[in-house]
Amino acid sequence: MQICVIGTGYVGLCSGVGLAAKGNQVACVGRNKDKIAGIQQGIPPIFEGGLQELLQEVLRNGLFRATDDFAGAVKEAEATFLCVGTPSGKDGRIDLTEMRQAAAQVGEALPDGYCVVVVKSTVVPGTTEEMIRILEERSGRKAGKDFGVCMNPEFLREGRALQDFLQPDRVVVGQLDPRSGDVLQRLYAPFQAPILRTDLKTAEMIKYASNSLLATKISFANEVGNLCKQLGIDTYAVMGGVGLDHRIGPHFLRAGVGFGGSCFQKDVSALKSLAEDQGVPAPLITDVLEVNRRQRFKIIDLLERRLPVNGKTIAILGLSFMGGTDDIRESPALDIIPALLQKGAAVRAYDPQATRHVRPLFPQVTYCASAREALAGADACLLLTEWEEFRSLTDQDFSGMRSPVILEGRRMLDRSKVSRFEGICW
């Protein structure tokens, strides 16, 4: 199938490369000429496990290209996916500026024959219907008759985005009409995943409900974890027992420094604002955000129980919001680092991929080339991100520290190999 993907960010590029890997002809459209040139050379603008290798493969096979020719790519496509940013505003509501602009441009460039326009970005219920009006106004054609419309939310975890795209738990297809949905049914048939076909608003809401529930599990685990810490109970043992219940499951029950990233915070905030706009009380959703906000500072409270921060050197291991990605959006480190600096600490930091994004934000931090370098001379270590290389750290790596204060926000270290703990949080 001829596919056009509007957007070269995490969702757009991973979706485009994933669709090409299934044998489709994909044109990925962006505005930044330097970024487009890099992608064409097989160099993605983001770090995502396996992305560069698969990008280079689909480029070699002639199944993928990056372009800034918006109209040309749309006119050739049987399906055009809108994968543009929908950032969160200060009030929690999503900004649809890019989505509206993209829909207008697609409307002006629709091919003469039948095609399907697919909203893949995360948008609140009712947004796809608004895009239909824009498409019809700009094209002078009728949705459902002259072109199809679907809402196909993404469920990609950064760091595992390609795996999630190529091996999805389910594919949700919100359809304007059966003909529109049939196109995506054919497109996703090779993925061998359950395909749920529903209406546009339901598809939009499934994404918000899904992410908000996952965020709720994390905040619940953190609330229980704080209580367990006070009582001297291992919350990981508690949640391990809880997760054995098949009704609950083991995932997203790890206490620590809270969730980050571009999705959970933004989506829960948008759902909260949507409830407010509809006059529906949603205190649980509000509390999920507040628990997460407080949680990222809990590790500093635990640190201050062990040593005075002022004048001390603190090593930060992990700057991205999660392992496997260089994305720092809503990363706990972005709140923890300035809090430590304000308290008079010197900060040494290491991350395998995200340092280049954080360095301009906090130039007073010492950025290191390895975990061992960051730990050398440190009075304490805060481990904030689940990078695989941190799992293999041993006593030898921590031997250069001035004191054995190691606080984990992710429970990764093998304590049989690291005996220097004065305390592990959670």
Image (cartoon, grey):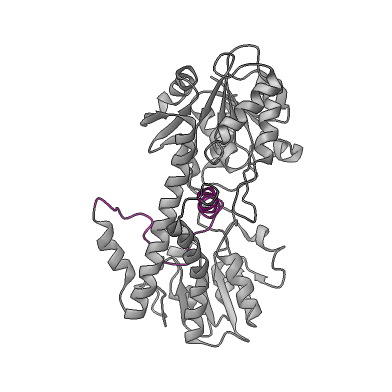
Is 383 magenta? The answer is no
* Observer-nearest of 288 and 297: 288
- In the figure, is residue 381 to the left or right of 185? right
Q: In the picture, residue 11 is in which quadrant?
A: top right
Q: What residue is at 54 percent from the left and 17 percent from the top?
A: 144
Instruction: Determine if residue 163 is in view.
Output: no
Q: Which residues are magenta?
A: 246-275
Q: Is residue 386 above or below residue 271?
A: below
Q: What residue is at 56 percent from the left and 61 percent from the top?
A: 331
Instruction: Determine if residue 415 is in view.
Output: yes
* Percent coordinates x, y for residue 45 in the rendering: 65, 44
Q: Is residue 133 above or below residue 301?
A: above
Q: What residue is at 59 percent from the left and 48 percent from the top?
A: 47
* Percent coordinates x, y for residue 348 in the rendering: 62, 73
Q: What residue is at 28 percent from the left and 67 percent from the top?
A: 238
Q: In the picture, residue 7 is in which quadrant?
A: top right
* Observer-nearest of 367 and 192: 192
Q: For the stretch drawn in magenta, what is the main secondary structure?
A: loop
* Percent coordinates x, y for residue 225 in the rendering: 37, 70
Q: In the picture, residue 359 is in which quadrant?
A: bottom right
- In the figure, is residue 233 to the left or right of 160? left
